[in-house]
Image (spheres, helix red, strand yellow):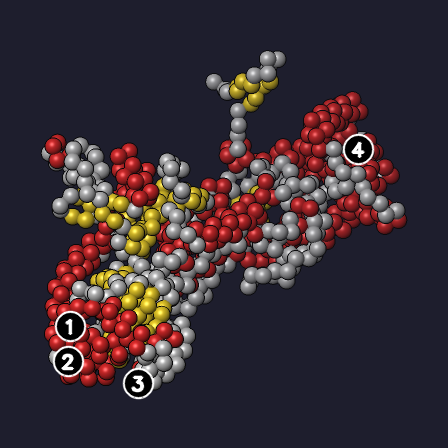
Amino acid sequence: MNPETYSATSLQTYSEPSLLEHPLPSLPNTPELDSNAIEEWQSWLSSHRIWSQLPTATLQAIAKAFYCFRVEAQTLIYQEGQTPIGLYLIQSGCIEIFRRSPIGNSLIRYRHAGDLFGYTLIANAVEGTYQTNAIALNASKILFLPKTTFRTLVIEFPEIQQMIHSLLSQDLLEYATRIAREQIRIQGLQAYIQPVSQEATILGSSKAAQKLREQIQHVSQTLDPVIFQAPVGSGKTFLAKLIHVQSRLSAQPFAEMDCADLPRTADGRLNTDALFGRVDQQPGILELLERGTLLLENVQVLSEGDRARLIHYLKTGLVLPNHGIGAKTALATEPPQPSQSWVRLILAAPHKVELSDVDAVTIKLFALPQRKADIPDFARYFLSQFCHEQDRPLLNLDQSDLRRLLSYEYPGNLSELAEILHRAVIMTPQGNSVIPEQALWSVQSTKNAFRLDLLTHVSWLRRFLLSRWYPTAIWGVMMAIFVPVTVLGFVGPQTRESSVTLTLFWAWWWPGYLFLFAFVGRLWCAVCPFMIVGEWARQISLWLFPRRQLAWNTQWLNHWGAWVLFGSFVAIFLWEQLWDLPHHAYLSAWLLVAIAAGAVIFSLIYERRLWCRYLCPIGGMNGMFAKLSMLELRSTQQVCGSQCSTFGCYKGSSATPITFADALPTEGQATGGCPLYSHPAQLQDNRDCMLCMTCLKACPNRSAQLNLRFPASDLLDNHRGLKWTLKTGQRVKLHKG
């Protein structure tokens, strides 16, 4: 049989399940080699510096015993723990012998054409398993000598044993040198080597997370340097590990060094010996690591000289060591001898880093406040991790907890979120399945300072405000009072002492209404009889004549609406003063009818409640005085922006399915949107909120909050200096005092 016909799979009958790529055919008991092949191999052996020491008869016997096979690049020939089945002689190619260790592949040796490998145990007639691995670095041609055949040859030709012992002596010396070097490597890298997970994935569904996945996948396919432009705590280490795991260097170690932690000399210069090494004294991490991935954080603190050497390494793969801080001037003029390294660099800095003439990929990592939509996924991941560490059942977050997490700004980004949840898990008593709000005491939005959410702390209040009783059921009660009182103003007694209309309107409703401003703000507008008449007129009109009502001319209304209100107040004031409204029942009744007529007219023409927001004289006064209220309705901007996809609170929507566990059946209702066209997350004060709770009914994420606060908080928190436009176009702030 021609030995050239044997492939890389020729040894199956001699080994454990093969590491090679294809199943191996059985070898014949006696190889059938032609004379040309024997002469070729004998000639090749006799020309080699080691094998040429053997007699011709010995070389001929060895040539007859060989089997030949070929392997492709990156083919693992044997590995640790396998039982040796024979000896291997390289005819062409290169084989790497290595052992895996905590710092990656170590004790690396290379075998070239004419070198023997995998023979130590067989040559010493010792039973055991391989302690190293052998892999082909390129396409190679290997001659194989089975173990039984080798032992037969040794008995017949003792000089083979002598040659093998000579090789073993050389290997022993080389091995001792390698062991000493590996000890230095392990000691030098111990503080920097980081464990990596093979199952890590990027969390989140936001656009930023999706783009990040694409970028990480792209850079993992190459070994180009990567630059992270990232704030503190944004997950640089995790992403660098992910790049390493998905790259061709996954079998090599991953290390991390923070340049900001490097020591400084007395004059303030950065000592980079740990990074680049020092001439004749200590190797740096780039040299010790040899191959793998290094995350270098805070590279912006490096000096121009150190950065230039970093660029030189990225271009050439050569590490220029330091002469040593405080070295002699003459020595400093001598160029240092570079060392070769194959370490991939991932650089990180909070701002953009410029590396001239370096083909690096820059990835910008967003801060956590810019990825609010991903916070629920991060929170679930951290809770799962910390609960597992604490050996307790998985804890959950209710909607109020999630709202707090989403509204916080996280100066420390992901690291701070992880620490907050770690502390919350520790603080949560055993037996609880949900993290209590008190455990998130450090998570407080500045907008919620000195505020108490009544919907969270008063259990029945949410159910009542979501029910059909509020506010539509109250409308019937209001109309049962308003209609008779108005009619009595026309047909009943006209004097102040006898008129129910005058007594109720001027003596009770008006002063009581002003008093309630400080407590409930613009709540009256939610049950106002003028608005109720307008809404009922709209519903009947659309039922009889289906049509699309006009949209608001918001620009005109914002500019002129206040002047219309001012004119209405002047007209009412003059009417009251000239005709003495508080003492004439029919005139007061006409005032009520006039305001109700305005509500009906504009409700028939325009969509929603334009009259209530811009033109109603009572509504305008309500909006101004509602800023004194102790109540406010707000929504968390971060929840609305990251969790909501329906926006039913603003534009209206059909019923929305609720996904969280403790949801009420009345949440996520179908609504027509805010009657005043206000988005609760954008409210700056109480002027344009009448507490109708449409947003609360529509919201599927419990973003709405009914807060108890200090009176007049709108004036205290949101006060701004007045602005006056001069003829020159300049704006001048006017401040008191």
Residue type at tag 2: Phe
Q: Which mark is drawn over residue 591?
A: 4
What element does badge 4 sit on? helix
> Alpha-carbon distance for marks 4 and 2?
127 Å
> Alpha-carbon distance for marks 1 and 4?
125 Å
Q: Which residue is mark 1?
A: 54
Residue visible at 37% across and 83% down in the picture: 26
Q: Which residue is mark 3?
A: 30
Q: Are marks 1 and 3 in contact (CB under 8 Å)?
A: no
> Alpha-carbon distance for marks 1 and 2?
10 Å
Residue visible at 50% across and 52% down in the picture: 214
Residue type at tag 4: Leu
Residue type at tag 3: Thr
Q: Are marks 4 and 2 in contact (CB under 8 Å)?
A: no
- The residue closer to the viewer here, 354 or 51, is 51
Screen quadrant of the N terminus: bottom left
- The residue closer to the viewer here, 348 or 340, is 340
Q: Which mark is drawn over residue 157?
A: 2
- The residue closer to the viewer here, 436 or 195, is 195
The mark that comes first in sequence, 1 or 4, is: 1
> Alpha-carbon distance for marks 1 and 3?
23 Å
| Viewer-nearest of discs 4 and 2 | 2
Q: Quadrant of residue 39?
A: bottom left
Report crowding for label 4: few under 14, some 14 to 19, many 20 or more residues within 10 A (C-alpha): some
Residue type at tag 1: Leu
What element does badge 2 sit on? loop
What element does badge 1 sit on? loop
